[in-house]
Each structure stands twice: as C-alpha cells, then as structure tokens.
Image: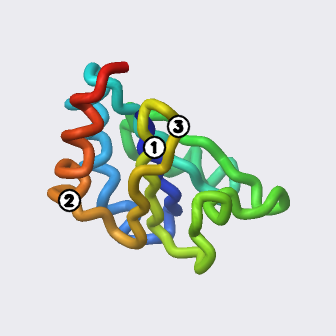
Amino acid sequence: MVLINFWATWCPPCVHEIPELIRLQDELSGQGLQVVGISDESVEDIRTFMNKVAFNYPILRNPPEQGDLSINYGNSQGILPYSVLIDRQGRIRQVYRGALQFDTLRSDLQPLLAESP
C-alpha cells in the first residue's frame, strides 16, 4: 500500500509532519507500506531541503507546467499538505486534507496492513 504525501518546503505543517512520515516508513515498510512524497517545487529547492533531511522514502517532483497531480487524487482546493492512502489493490481508501493526524492514520492503516498482499 502507498501513502502519497503532497508537500512543499515552504509549508510549515508539511515540514512538521516529515519526521513522523520517516518513522512510519521505518516502522511499517516491512509490512507493505511505502510513503511517497510529491512536491511541485524546483529541483534546486527540493534538493536543498533533502540535503537537510534524511528522507527514507522517495521524493518525486510534479512539474507545475504538467498540472497539479494532487487534483487527480481529489485535491480540488490545492490544500497542502494533502495525503492519499492507497490499498494493495490500488484503491483510494482515505484522503487527508491538511496536516496528518497520525493516530487517525495509524488506525486507518491497521486493517489494511492485516490484508494479505
């Protein structure tokens, strides 16, 4: 399963939740969770930030000229952070608008982690 996290370096709630996303990836990757971060910022801005933070999950760039990928996942208002939980069958199971509430996320993950791969 995948947790897609749309974020930006200039977004305080986005930056604040990154350490917990790193912990979540460490803790649950062996059970099938993959966190993926997506930013529409410049390559330079993303690299500069990544030099300060030891990400353990992939960071992808969504070039603005290609449109906002988060809209394809229901983010019609352009909210950041914006996260989408996708199950093992590729279905969107939950959408999180704004800062993640990690107790809620962990609750949502438990039944999905129990499903067979």
Label 3 packing within 10 angstroms: few (<14), some (14-19), many (20+): few
Residue 6 on image: x %, y %: 52, 57
Binning the other alpha carbons within 10 Å of mark 1 as few (below 14), some (14 to 19) or many (20 upward) gives many
Quick check: 42 above or below 31? below
Residue under the point 18% across and 51% down:
107
Residue 51 visible to the viewer = no
Mark 3 in CB contact with mark 1 (< 8 angstroms): yes
The mark closer to the camera, 2 or 3, is 3
63 w.r.t. 26: above or below: below
Q: Amino acid at mark 1?
A: Ile
The numbered disc on residue 45 is: none
Q: Nearer the viewer, residue 26 or 112?
A: 112
Disc with the residue nearer the chain's start (2 vs 3) = 3
Q: Residue at x 31, y 46 (%)?
A: 21
Left or right: where 105 falls relative to 41: left
Residue at (69% x, 55% y) in the render:
42
Residue 54 image position (x, y, % from top left): 37, 37
What residue does disc 2 label?
A: 104
Residue 25 shows up from this direction? yes
Residue toward you, 83 or 112:
112
The span from disc 3 to disc 1 (Cα, nearest Å) is 6 Å
In the picture of the structure, the residue carrying the numbered disc 3 is 90
Q: Position of residue 103 (x, y in %)?
A: 15, 57
**Three-letter code, disc 3:** Gly
- According to the picture, the residue beneath numbered tag 1 turns out to be 86
Label 2 to label 1: alpha-carbon separation: 15 Å
